Structure formats: C-alpha cells, structure tokens
Image (tube, rainbow, N blue to C red):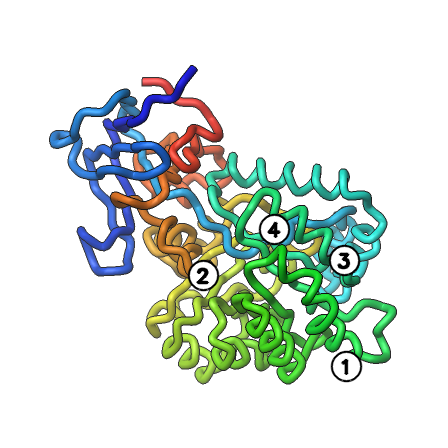
Amino acid sequence: MVDPQSTLITGISELVTNDGTAGPPGGFTALTDAALVIDGDRVAWTGPASRAPAADAVLDVRGRAVLPGFADSHAHLIFAGERSAEFAARMAGRPYRAGGILTTVEATRGAPDRLLRANLRRLAAEMLGQGTTTFECKSGYGLTVADEARGLALAAEITSEVTYLGAHVVPPEYAGDIAAYVDLVRGPMLAACAPHARWIDVFCEDGAFGAAEAAAVLAAGSAAGLGTRVHANQLGPGPGVQVAAQAGAASADHCTFLTDADVDALASTPVVATLLPGAEFGTRQPFPDARRLLDAGVTVALATDCNPGSSFTASMPFCIALAVREMRMTTEEAVWAATAGGARALRRDDIGTLAPGVRADLILLDAPSHAYLAYRPGVPLIAAVWQAGRLAAGAVTS
C-alpha cells in the first residue's frame, strides 16, 4: 500500500506546537480543537480544525492530544550485561558510586557485535514505542580504541546523534596513569571514533575526570569537528558546569549539585541544563532543583539517561512524571523540556516543535491533554507515533 502524499489529522483536543505563536517565544504553546497536515516527511500546516485545508487522506483522532515527538538527548544504549543486583543493593541502602560502570565495561568488551546491535535496536524500539522519535546515543562502555569505535559505528546505524564518550571512567589497565589514558582518549581513540560521531562527552566528576582533564578532552574533540557535551555535577559539587560553559558545550547533563555561580553560568550562556530524573530515581540521590534553574532563566531539557546501571528506563513519560512530582516543574515545562528542550540540547531546529516545515515527528496520546503524562503515571498513553511523516509505532483508526 502506498502512503498518501498528505494527511490531515483532525479532531485534536490539544495540539502542542511549541512554536511560540500563541504564547511566549521559546515556550510551551498549544492549540485546542486543532488540526495538522503532514505532507511527505514534514508538517505542512497547523491551526483550528474549522480552517483545515484539504489533504489526500483524513484521520479523525476524536478528541485526543497530539504532541511533538520526544527528543531524548542523553542515553547510553551500547552495552552488554545487566546490573539489577546493584540496583537492588542501592534500594537496600548501599550508596551509588561511579565505579559500577566498569562492570558493564567488562561485559561490553566481551560481547560480539550481533549482541550489542540487538540490544541497541531493542532499546531504540522501546524508546520509539514510548514516544521518542529522536535519541542521542553515547559510547563509553568499551574504553579501548577498537571497542569505542565499534560501538559508535553500531549506534550510527540507527541515529545521527552519536556521542563519543571515551572519557567515561578510567579503565582498569590505566588505573595508575590517568594522564596516559587522557592522551589515548584525545589522540588515537578520538581519531578512530570521530568519523562515527557528532558529539564528544566527558564525565567530569570525582572518581572520573577532573576539570583540566575534561577541558583537554573537549578541546581535542572540538578541534576534530565534534560538538561538546559534559556529564556535570551529578554526584556532588564540582567543576563540570563551569567546564561546560567555558567550552561552549551544547549541554551540561545531570546538574544535581549546583552553586549560585553554576546557575549564573548556565543562565548567561547557551548551555542547556539537561536533567535526568531517572538517575535520581535509580540511585536515591537528591533530584535536581529544576525550579531554581527555570526561575533563573536557564534552558532546561529532560532526558532518560537510559543505561544499565543508574537509570534503566527508556520512558520519557516516566521522566516527565518524575520531573513534575519531584523537580517542581509544571506539566507544560516538563513536556517542553522533553521535546523542544531536548532539541535545543542537540542544537536541532527541525524537531521538538510542530510548525510548518519541521520534521513530522509526532505523538498521539490516548488522552485529551499533555497533562495526562504526569496525571496518569505508569499508564501506557502513547497510542501512535509518527516519525518523519510515517506511522512508526502504534495504530490509529478514525
């Protein structure tokens, strides 16, 4: 069956556009009693249902909400093994430590490509079913030149948002010589990985990499043509946010323990604060204070941090619900952060909104309003997902 060239989706109770035409520029905006036209892989028109133009096909969604597809700007999907026992121990009171990453490194190094590819594709499909139409994928569980490069090559098969994270932690074979490992990361490993990646990231934290080491890694990546990102201030106060601001990074991710100077740095630069409430849920750490950041004028994104150790969830709706309940975000702020905010963190202007000319990535909720994502936590509300204009998950009939 050949897809029609254009499709009118009508009967939309709430159409979240985030296009700024019905409210503050750059903020959450929505239309009621709305319609939308998809033409090819793009949105061609949005507006009141009563003014909808003709299209080749018509789909009446009968009073349900339509949102932009979620943009998950922080995920670690290239791995083998699992760490459920570690999670259970944390829930029983054992504190979280970054060193658990090495358990996954060992399993990943020993896994064949077919296993890594199958796990990656399974998780990507899980994300799509939860409404995520764009996701970023990091390496960081190989930590050798060959293992980092093969992981990134696998990720590049299914997403353009690929991040080289050789500076995740120091592997055991370099435990006594962190400087030598940093030289590897910014030298031969970078040369092997850069052709597969768009971004470079570094875990700037006690137990991982300090400020000088992180800055050196980011500078090398930038010189190789990669955009920069930083794991910052997750486990305690530290230099990560300042390193991100000085490097002109697209995002500083986690942002759990911030000083006033850190908040000022985020507010005065284009660095997006990407908050990862799944990690706090999975580690019993304090949740980031999103309200403090938003009130200071910081651009905030939400992401899942899907990984086998600290946040094994692919569900952006779950993260939205956590953000509303635990991080003092409104439902509008949380949905904007999971859509347009994620797009900002990826420096994309073709996703995260629903306006004429953008990619036709959209979600149909089995609910009348975006607020149901937090109002009915844990309930599967994603009825259908369109990716680049094609129905990619779920099913819907008039």
Give the spatial CA distance, label 1 vs label 3.
18 Å
Say which amino acid is labelled 4. Cys
Give the spatial CA distance, label 4 vs label 3.
17 Å
Give the spatial CA distance, label 3 vs label 2.
25 Å
* Circle 1 residue: 179
Say which amino acid is labelled 2. Ala
* Circle 2 residue: 345
Say which amino acid is labelled 3. Gly
Establish if 274 lies above or below 391.
below
268 or 2, nearer to the observer? 2
Q: Earlier in the sequence, mark 2 or mark 4?
A: 4
SS for callout 1: helix
Q: Quadrant of residue 238?
A: bottom right
Is residue 387 visible from the viewing direction of this image? yes
Residue shown at 31% from the left, 30% from the top: 64
Give the spatial CA distance, label 4 vs label 1.
29 Å
Is residue 282 visible from the viewing direction of this image? no
Please state the horizontal and vertical placement of residue 315, each as a whole percent of the image.
53, 44
Please state the horizontal and vertical placement of residue 200, each as a whole percent of the image.
59, 66
SS for callout 4: loop
Give the spatial CA distance, label 2 vs label 4.
16 Å
Residue shown at 21% from the left, 60% from the top: 24
Q: Quadrant of the N terminus?
A: top left
Establish if 41 lies above or below 79.
above
Q: Which label number is shown at residue 142?
A: 3
Say which amino acid is labelled 1. Ala
* Circle 4 residue: 306
Task: Count numbered badges in the picture.
Answer: 4
Give neighbour class at mark 3: few <14, some 14-19, many 20+ (Cα, 10 Å).
many
